Image (cartoon, rainbow, N blue to C red):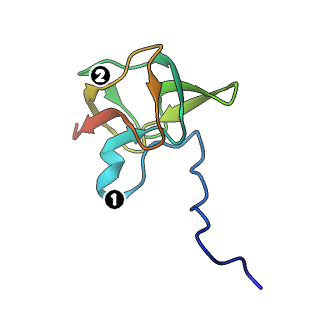
Amino acid sequence: PAAGGGAARPARRASGGGGGGANDRRVVAPMQGTVVKVLVAVGDAVTAGQPVVVLEAMKMENQLMAERDGVVESVRVAPGASVGAGDVLVELADA
């Protein structure tokens, strides 16, 4: 039988950005970690799949990608910042 109970949803792949639907405007941290690099600035045009932030988690560096084309509307983190799972790192606007 399948395991039931309060099993947590599987973690998103670290290379992914946000969720989907309305949240694809945001690149969120898939897990707790430390921001190593911010690869974009406000006003930069980005394409789907482009790395925007490098996050160190569990002693590994993970590139977080934009899930859609757009323009960087806000960058909410800086290198060295500690983030939690689900924290918004970058927000995108329509190009």
Name the foreground residue: 21 vs 4. 4
Furthest-front residue in view? 5
Q: Position of residue 66 (x, y in %)?
A: 42, 38
Q: From the viewer's perspective, is residue 38 above or below residue 14?
A: above
Q: Position of residue 81 (x, y in %)?
A: 44, 19
Eye-nearest disc, 1 or 2:
1
Picture residue at 61% right of the left edge, 58% below the top: 10
Q: Which mark is residue 21?
A: 1
Q: Is residue 53 left or right of residue 24?
A: right
Say which amino acid is labelled 2.
Asp
Label tally:
2
Quadrant position of the N terminus in the picture: bottom right
Furthest-right residue in view? 1
Q: From the viewer's perspective, is residue 22 above or below residue 87?
A: below
Q: Position of residue 11 (x, y in %)?
A: 59, 52
Which SS class for mark 1? helix
Q: Which mark is residue 44?
A: 2
Which SS class for mark 2? loop
Determine the image quadrant of residue 14.
top right
Mark 1 vs 2, N-terminal side? 1
Name the foreground residue: 2 vs 24. 2
Q: Is residue 60 left or right of residue 15?
A: right
Determine the image quadrant of residue 9.
bottom right
Q: Is residue 9 left or right of residue 94?
A: right
Quadrant position of the C terminus in the picture: top left
Name the foreground residue: 16 vs 69. 16
| Disc 2 crowd, CA 10 A, few/some/many (<14, 14-19, 20+) | few
Say which amino acid is labelled 1.
Gly
